Amino acid sequence: MILNFKNANIFYTDEGKGSAVVLIHGFLENATMWDEIKPELIKKNRIITIDLLGHGKSDCLGYVHTMQMFSESIEAVLKHLKIRKCILVGHSLGGYISLAYTKMNITKIKGLCLLNSTSYEDSKERKDLRTRANKMVQNNFENMVKLSISNLFHQENLAAFKNEISKIKKEALQTSLQGYIAANEGMKLRTNTNAVLSENNFKKLIVIGEKDPVLDYKTSLDEAKKTNSEFVVFPDGHMSHIENKNELITVLKEFVKKC
């Protein structure tokens, strides 16, 4: 389904009955990233997926997509669907957006799961990497996107998940060049949102990859403890929905049930 938001089309899906669970994908992903996860969750819940601005079937809205702007587009969808309370599950960038959404709509949150994500802002090194990537991608979009996807997996898993990675790369290439750059610029601008987790009493879960090439394992553990968040550690990389799919489904079903 399509919703118009500030003259940009936002694609979303809405299926099932029960508690509203909003699944928010990450950078270079789209709603299809949840295809293997959704069937189990949908048995007892209402599942909403949304293509973020500049990703999948959704349009761009300018040249910088801030976390607040992403959040406002999600709020437009949920308001249209008359959803008053929800559980958020955000992967990577989707986690940053979930935190921004929660900060703006605290009374609507029953639970928040950060899946391979963090409430910390970008380090200077990470910001510099995003700046370089945004320059390089303008001349070599396809190769940059494909390399970005491969770099999210624990390197020992590349052969085992060859088919899945090929499919993810194909979906990632649906992201527009403008969407790629706008999301990176927005991620560089985001601020520390530790307080969103530590100062609120809704159910909180952080899913951590022990060999995540993007997020430092020990930092993620410390973050969970510092913010009084429940946490689960998987043995692999940044793509827990692929690398640890069955275990993640079990964890998410249990988390949603507790919210």
Image (spheres, grey):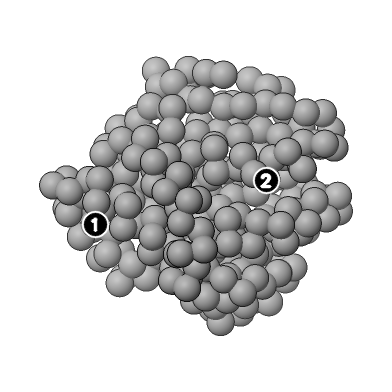
Q: Name the side, left or right, on which 130 lies relative to 169.
A: left
In the rendered image, which quarter is residue 69 located in?
top left
- Residue type at mark 1? Ala
Q: Nearer the viewer, residue 15 or 86?
A: 15
Q: Nearer the viewer, residue 147 or 56?
A: 147
Give me the disc on residue 37.
2
**Residue under circle 1?**
133
Q: Name the side, left or right, on which 184 lies relative to 244.
A: left
| Number of residues whose C-alpha sits closer than 10 Å to that of mark 1, classed few (under 14), some (14–19) or many (20 or more) | some
Q: Is residue 217 above or below residue 51?
A: below
Q: Is residue 76 visible?
A: yes
Question: Contact (CB < 8 A) between labels 1 and 2?
Answer: no
SS type, badge 2: loop
Residue drawn at x 85%, y 37% as measured from the top left = 44
Q: Nearer the viewer, residue 204 or 165?
A: 165
SS type, badge 1: helix
Q: Earlier in the sequence, mark 1 or mark 2?
A: 2
Q: Is residue 200 above or below residue 31?
A: below
| Residue furthest left in the image | 139
